[in-house]
Amino acid sequence: MILRVSMKVRDPRHVAAVLAEIVDRPVVDAGAGWLITSGQGSDLEVLERPEGAPSSGECGIALATPLTIAEVFAIAGREGWPARHRRPQGTSGVIELLLEGDCRIDVLTAEMQGA
């Protein structure tokens, strides 16, 4: 069971707020960062990446969302974050989202989760 996953970004408060919007969960100030609570015991902690530190580029996180593909793309567009809908063979696909333009996560709509 995963209890917490952490990621480091340039603007943790902003990234946490946008991710909380995508997954439709609350975000709270956790002192050293921001915490998106799942209500099921596994949380996502968003921390500040030190100035000048390189991005890991790959966060290795897949998030479930109640939003539609169009709604996720609208949020990505609003934030200026690149996004694309990939459809590996035999799947309904996944939305690849680049947080702050350099940290890739996967977002799966309800339709994508059911495939």
Image (cartoon, rainbow, N blue to C red):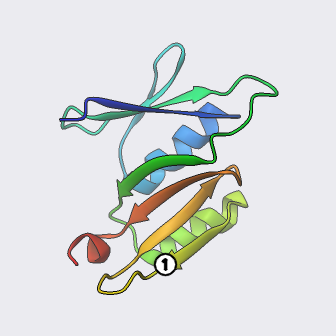
In this image, 49 relative to 40: left or right?
right
Left/right placement of residue 33 relative to residue 115 reads right
Is 114 left, or right, of 96 in this rendering?
left
Residue occupying image coordinates x 59% and y 42% = 15
Provide residue 29's location: percent of width, then percent of height.
Answer: 49, 22
Against 1, is 77 above or below?
below
Name, please, the residue furthest toward the bottom. Answer: 89
Q: Would residue 36 be seen by someone viewing this image from the given angle? A: no
Residue 11 screen position, x and y as percent: 68, 34
Q: Position of residue 73 (x, y in %)?
A: 56, 72
Image quadrant containing the C terminus: bottom left
Identify residue for label 1: 86
Q: Secondary structure at mark 1?
A: strand
Q: Residue 65 appears at what percent x and percent y?
A: 35, 61
Counting labels gives 1
In terms of depth relative to the viewer, which is nearer, 24 or 99? 99
| Residue at left offset 49%, top offset 78% | 86
Q: Name the residue rendered at 68%, 57% in the picture.
A: 79
Seen in the picture, residue 67 relative to 12 is either above or below; the reply is below
Whether residue 63 is visible to the viewer of this picture, yes or no, is: yes
- Label 1 crowd bin: few (<14), some (14–19), many (20+), radius 10 Å: few
Locate residue 52: give its quadrant.
top right
Amino acid type at mark 1: Arg
